Image (tube, rainbow, N blue to C red):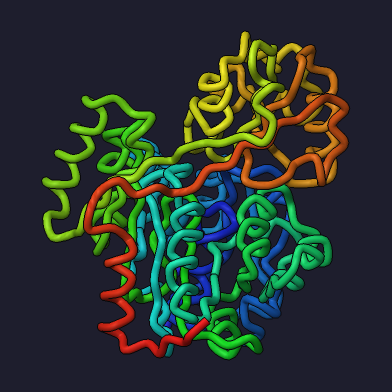
Amino acid sequence: MLRKNVIIIGAAGRDFHNFNTFFRYNEAYNVVGFTAAQLPFIHERHYPHTLAGEELYPYGISIYPEQDLPKLIKEKEIDFCVFSYSDVSYEHVMKISSIVHAAGANFLLLGPDNTMLKSRKPVISICATRTGCGKSQTSRKVCELLMQHGIRVVIIRHPMPYGNLIRQKLQRYESLSDLKEHKCTIEEMEEYEPHLERGNVIYAGVDYEAILHAAEKDPKGCDVILWEGGNNDFSFFKSDLYITVTDPLRAGSEVSYYPGEVNLRLADVIIINKIDSASLPEIHSLRENIQQTNQSAIVIDAASPVRVDKPDLIRNKRVLVIEDGPTLTHGNMQVGAGVIAAQRYNASEIVDPRPYLVGQLKETFKTYPKIGNLLPAMGYGNDQTRDLEESINRTNCDSVVIGTPINLSRIIKIKKPTVRVFYDLAEISQPGLEEVIENFIAEKRIKTRKL
């Protein structure tokens, strides 16, 4: 049988998972390449034969820039292009579809039934409708509720394999020292560090079938798998409880961004986060969209109250605000925890960092001009991390407000006074997550332990 030629359009995450679950051993298709977008440096690599499968892909699979897609379709006689990355508008998805169709190929989206893995353990998935809705703080809250019952939780995080793919096939994190061992980027540390500080084990990597099997047999024990999604991607696992976090500050995105609406429709529980920051019209618009899309889900209202360790370094000061990188870039957010802290603690000015940028950060602002006068904590490689450090220290400000989930000053040398911003999920409606988790424990008959 003549195999159909395929290109997987991705961004170093869902694309590899789609290949592993649907194409790796599928003799009907021949994946001739991946394309890469959204993130820097990821197209300068090769998907190795040890991950791709020796039998069908003895030489591995090349990774190309997405802008080469029309040329690749023609040169390699492509039959299907499979769109495989997240947090993009429906307009963007269809624009890529038009490029593919105009070049003569078919455009394909893979769904949950062909890509979700089944666990032997109960699975809770935490997903969102956009990047930056509050998945991480929701995951922390769910973990705390489970752990209060003596339940052993293992977290599996959406992939962020930005380095050596062979080494990153299966990664296990138990302590902060593991972050250094695995040469984590700032973006990875932002997701892993808060969980590790609470004593949770985290798995991530490239091959999620291998990752799932290892997590189920974790040496510290595993009663429940908690999937923490990335961007607004849907879960890699068949889920017993599906929680989707939404953001009224971007009301409308939940029904206009891919695949966020998938998460909205799959949800057993929908959290309306940031109630304390959004306007009543924004909240009302989001509620209407939820009601029209998923009437069966439990809806929980929640706030994201911020607190800081040194309020005097904000009050009446000219501050540089640093926010989570992906939230500002493809998440399109212009207000994060750092901005809210600066406003609530009466900073005299949020200093514009753009005149002080160096190196690759200049390119970030060219690609995402709507970032404005905030500084994204970009650190996908050593050079970018050094550029971030120099840009911060060049900025003419009194203090630096760090709105990222990690202690950034532990990673880079900031020569100015720093303020850390902390934020957690605070439910303000009933029933809340406590009742949801108790019902989940009872329904799945999960053994609890006295602490």
In percent of width and height, residue 161 lies at 66, 61
**Which of the 4 image quarters holds residue 413?**
top right
Along the horizontal axis of the image, is 242 left or right of 206? left
In percent of width and height, residue 6 lies at 48, 64
**Which of the 4 image quarters holds residue 438?**
bottom left
Along the horizontal axis of the image, is 235 left or right of 221? left
Q: Which one is nearer the viewer's eye here, 298 or 6?
A: 298
Residue 346 appearing in the image: yes
Along the horizontal axis of the image, is 72 left or right of 447? right
Question: Residue at the location (51% across, 76% down)?
Answer: 153
In percent of width and height, residue 66 lies at 56, 45
Above or below, 54 against 105 in this view is below
In percent of width and height, residue 374 lies at 61, 23
As drawn, which residue projects farthest toward the front? 451
Above or below, 359 against 119 in this view is above
Q: Which one is nearer the viewer's eye here, 63 or 329?
A: 329
Quadrant of image for the N terminus: bottom left
Question: Residue at the location (31% across, 50% down)?
Answer: 271
Question: Residue at the location (67% across, 66% down)?
Answer: 47
Above or below, 390 against 446 in this view is above
Residue 94 appearing in the image: no
Number of dots carrying numbers: 0
Question: Residue at the location (69% across, 30% down)?
Answer: 310
